[in-house]
Amino acid sequence: MESTATKPQFSEAAQAEIARICKQYPEERRKSAMLPVLHIAQAEFGGWVSPEVQDLVAEVLGVKPIEVYEVSSFYTMFNLKPVGKHVLEICRTGPCMLRGSDELTAQLERITGAKVGGPASEDGLFTLKEVECLAACGFAPIVQVREQYYEQLDTPEAVDAMLSELRNQVHRPALPWEETGLPNAVANN
């Protein structure tokens, strides 16, 4: 039986950015572009890389799908299941733990309703993820959301301010290759 599901496709802007990236490598080393292309794929397709999207990356780079699966499952920066609009990456290493990251995690779980390692919050806004060192120990405890660091989240007021800012974002920030707006695949993400 043949599948009727639509095969994912990159937007024209993403295709142009992928072409630009791939030109930086000799044709026989095109696989070297895998990490940046996976980042583009994750941004294009709702914040995660499904098996179908990973297959698309493999096709674009001319590699076997298993090669993409190996890379995407190794690096924690790639989400392999659907995520909320905002992925809150909570630092869990020593300095952050000493400054209250465990309490921060419990507070975020209580307020958002999401659980670390679990599905997104019921409103679809938040996914919680514990990560290793975010290299901002002097500002612990911290959370990273995309390229933004939220530092010194050791008071309820600081946590509330971060969540309020995120809830009030109309959409995610534009990506570097998006000169004419958001790609259709994530216009409402």
Image (cartoon, rainbow, N blue to C red):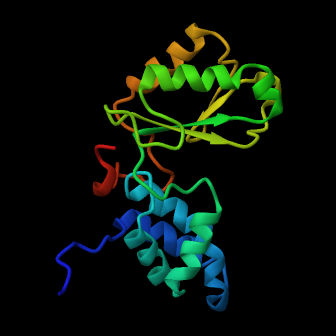
Image quarter where the N terminus lies is bottom left
* Quadrant of res 98: top right
Total marks in image = 0
The correct choice, above or below, for 170 with respect to 57 in the image is above
- Residue pushed farthest bottom? 28
Q: Of residues 150 and 121, which is closer to you in this image?
A: 121
Q: Of residues 7 and 83, which is closer to you in this image?
A: 83
Q: Residue at x 41, y 52 (%)?
A: 179
The correct choice, above or below, for 168 with respect to 146 in the image is above
Q: How far from the left and from the top, in percent, is residue 65? A: 50, 82
Q: Residue at x 52, y 24 (%)?
A: 108
Q: How far from the left and from the top, in percent, is residue 4? A: 17, 77
Q: How far from the left and from the top, in percent, is residue 157? A: 56, 8
Q: Residue at x 60, y 53 (%)?
A: 77
Q: Residue at x 54, y 38 (%)?
A: 116
* Quadrant of res 100: top right
57 on left or right of 133: left
Q: How far from the left and from the top, in percent, is residue 22? A: 58, 77
The correct choice, above or below, for 54 with respect to 165 in the image is below
The correct choice, above or below, for 97 with respect to 59 in the image is above
188 on left or right of 38: left
Image quarter where the C terminus lies is top left
